[in-house]
Each structure stands twice: as C-alpha cells, then as structure tokens.
Image (spheres, rainbow, N blue to C red):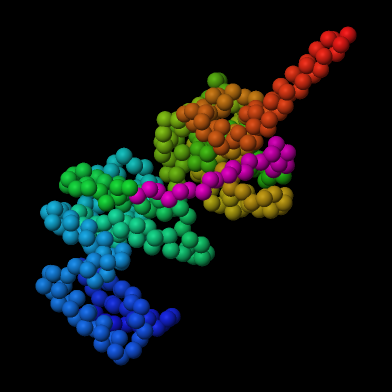
Amino acid sequence: MGNIRSRTDNGKLFFDFSYQNKRCREQTALDDSPSNRKKLQTILSRIEAEITLGQFDYSQYFPDSPRALQFQEMIKRKNMDLADTPLFSDFAKIWFNEMQAQWRQSHRDGVELVLNKYVLPAFGDKELGLITKAEILEFRSMIAAVKKKNGESLSPTRINHIITPLRMILNEAANRYDFSSPYHGIKSLKLPKTDVEPFTIDEVQLILKTVRPDFKLYYLVRFFTGMRTSEIDGLQWQYIDFERRQILIREALVRGELVYTKNDGSFRAIDMSQMVFDALQEQKKVTGKNKFVFCNSQGNALYHHNVCKRVWHPLLRHLGLRKRRPYQSRHTAATLWLASGESPEWIARQMGHTTTEMLFRVYSRFVPNLTRQDGSAFERLLNSHLQLGSNNKESDNA
C-alpha cells in the first residue's frame, strides 16, 4: 500500500509506493496541503490499480525518472524470455566453486568475503537475466558511500576489487545463458596515481646504523635486493645460492601461508651484491639451522604486523623520518640501481618486472641524468654548437 508523504526539508509532497519489489519514491512540486494530498492520492490509487492489473507504465506517470528506464529494461528482458535464468546466489556458488581451484587461498578468502559482505546481499535473490545496468551503478554508488571505522570512504581501488567478482559472474552467466551482460559499458573507477617515496642513500645508512641489531641484516637485505615484504618474510635457506651468489624467489608468505610466487615475473633470481652476500653469510650463523632466513626466536616466520608495530614505525619516529610503509625499501632499491647507472633490463629482472616499461613509468623522475628528463642533455647540445659557431666567426674575422 503506497502513501503520499511530505519532505521535511521543503514541505513538498512525493509518491511512496512499491513496484516490481522495489520501493519507488517520486517527487512532485506540490506543497503539502489537504487539496494537493487528495489530488495525488487519486493518482496513486490509479497507479496501484494498474500495477495490480499488470497495465502500469512507469514512464507514462514519471517520464523523467531514472527508474523509468530501469523498469523498461526489466520488461524488455522479460519479453525476451530471460526470466528463466537462475538466481544470482545460485550461479555465484557454481562460479566460485569452479574458479577457486586456480586461486591462492588468500585470494579465495578475499573473494568469498566480498561476495558475502557486499555482492550477495544486494543481488543474491535476483534473477541473473533481470539484473540491470542501473542496478549495478546504484550498487557501486552505495559502496562508495560506505564509511570505514575511521570515517573514511572506501578507496577507488577497494571499490573496483568489490565490483570485480560481480562483473566476472555476470559476464560468465551471460555467455552460458545467452543474454547480454548488463555490465557492458561500465568502466572501472579511475585510480589516483600513486607516488613512490623511496629513501635516500643517507637515510638508508641512518636506518641501518640505528635499527635494532637483530633487525639490521633484515633491513639491509630489504633495501639492497628490492624484495617484496611477502618474499623476504617467506625467504628460506634452501633458496639461497651462495655459490652463484643468487637469491631464488620461489615462494612468498601470504597471511601466514607459504605460496608460490604470483606470476612468472616474480619467479626470479636476484643477484647478490657483496654487501648482501656478506649480510646473508652473517645471518646464516644466527638462523642457519632454521627453515627461514629471518625468523623469531622459535624459528617461525616473522609476523609482519608485529615487525612494523614494534620495530619499523618506532624507528622512523625516533629518527624524525616521514612515516612510510616498509614496502618503500623495494622502491629504494630500484631508484638506487637506476641512479647508479645499472642496466634497466637487469633492474627489471631483479624487481620481477617482465619489461622495463613499469620501471621508467614509476621511477624515472628520481634519475634525471639517466632518463634525460631535466633537459641537461639538450642544454649541453646547444652550448656546444653555440660555442662552435662563435669560434668559427672568430676564425673568419681573422
């Protein structure tokens, strides 16, 4: 049963009724008065009668409403006999079971969390073939309005991650049940450009000089190999090749579980500098009998959250350095290699990049003399030619 209600902010009347299991609220320009209420109630009674008889045309009463287009799409799909597709929740379960064999446990857990917390409550009881583009966009807007405990909104990256399983499920269902995916034409949210904040060589030296002695070698290896956090925390002695002076990246520690590297580029061999070679030789005297290169007193892998909380962030505060994630040690290695003139192809292999494209896109501004982004090469070219021209004039005058 619908109602005629009044807005609290301006006193204007609006319709409030249900259609196709959706609550519909349509505004009017009429002020709240007995005569206007009576007029709108008459229209509302006619709307409800037409809904009961299956004759209601939303666009006839509310032609400018976004809901009108949404309901037109739903009716169109019904007329195309698409209503016999399964419920979203049923197909999502099939899709998840089929896909999970190719995922890491951590990724499986992440997808399951997103489905249960966000996607299934919004789409679980809907038929796949009747889900509309408008509903997807409305869902994304709803997620964007969610506030975290600290009062901040979800980042565009997080919103895109939440939307991804929805997109994959709808596109796969469209292929299997032969209907046009409502996700077609919806682009991911544009992500803000992230800036790297590497440490300078002086800052690295200060950190290594000041850090707790039992973590000095750990951070030295981080700063001068470019390993990811999961890679160094999961590093095992079986992957240290002192003879060839290489660190073999084969496994990573993700949420306390050792997993194989995520892609072919990550599966690599890092060449040891003399400093890293000596550091690992020294570390072997301490933890060589254990499985992990860097471990706690029980021989278990380091718990990264505790290391950050008890060692890393207190150290940066003590030194008066800007707060940064330990991951910046990876960026530091890349910028130091580039600045020293190492081959970009070699650096890309050390970092686990398949090409040098990302290397220059992310780090080039830190090495102007190498990438010629400061104009110095052009300046020298002009100066040399101008000087040559001046000399030629002098010789002509002579």
Residue 54 sits above or below residue 8 on the image: above
Q: Position of residue 74 (x, y in %)?
A: 21, 59
Residue drawn at x 46%, y 48% as measured from the top left? 190
Is residue 222 visible in the rendered image? The answer is: no
Which is more toward the observer, 200 or 214?
200
The dominant secondary structure in magenta is: loop
Say which quarter of the image contains residue 363.
top right
Q: Please state the horizontal and vertical placement of residue 222, each as a whole percent of the image.
A: 59, 37
Residue 210's place in the image compared with 334, above or below, is below
Quarter of the figure with the C terminus = top right
Segment colored magenta: 186-209
Residue sitting at 33 percent across and 53 percent down?
A: 112
Pinpoint residue 189: horizontal percent, then vertical percent: 43, 50
Q: Nearest the camera: 149 or 377?
A: 377
Viewer-side residue, 317 vs 153: 153
Number of numbered tags placed on the structure image: 0
